[in-house]
Image (tube, rainbow, N blue to C red):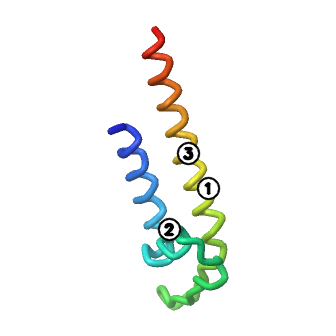
Amino acid sequence: MKMLDYEMKKTDDLLYRMIPKPVAKRLRKGEPAVNTCEVRIVDSAISCIYQCSLMINYHHQQQQQRQQKLQFQAFNNSCS
């Protein structure tokens, strides 16, 4: 489980570098992505965070796949 926690922290860190933490938390709670749209001025460029839900879904799927893989490995080790 330490490995899973480590991998989840890595993906969280990457996610929070791409989108603001408050937006990620709102999306995880099921809020529609369009409701989290924010306009930010960064170095005189305007960027809109709009399709965050796709990243959150990808992040969640990756975590589930890692967890399933770890569970499968633990099951195989217990059967050996």
Q: Residue at x 42, y 50 (%)?
A: 8
Q: Nearer the viewer, residue 47 or 68?
A: 68
Residue that mark 2 sits on: 18
Q: Residue at x 57, y 41 (%)?
A: 65
Q: Which mark identifies residue 58?
A: 1
Q: Nearer the viewer, residue 45 or 47?
A: 47
- Label 1's element? helix
Between disc 1 and disc 2, the foreground one is 1
- State the CA–CA distance, disc 3 to disc 2: 20 Å
Residue that mark 3 sits on: 64
Left or right of 65, for residue 7: left
- State the CA–CA distance, disc 1 to disc 2: 13 Å
Vertical side of 66 occupied by 55: above or below: below
Vertical side of 63 occupied by 75: above or below: above
Left or right of 7, for residue 51: right
- Label 3's element? helix
Vertical side of 46 occupied by 73: above or below: above
Between disc 3 and disc 1, the foreground one is 3
Q: Which mark identifies residue 27?
A: none
Q: Residues within 10 Å of mark 3 (few under 14, many from 20)?
A: some
Specify the amino acid type for callout 2. Met
* Percent position of residue 38, x then y: 56, 87
Q: Earlier in the sequence, mark 1 or mark 2?
A: 2
Q: Residue at x 40, y 59 (%)?
A: 13
Q: Number of numbered discs present?
A: 3
Q: Residues within 10 Å of mark 2 (few under 14, many from 20)?
A: few
Specify the amino acid type for callout 3. Gln
Q: Residues within 10 Å of mark 1 (few under 14, many from 20)?
A: few
Q: Residue at x 58, y 88 (%)?
A: 46
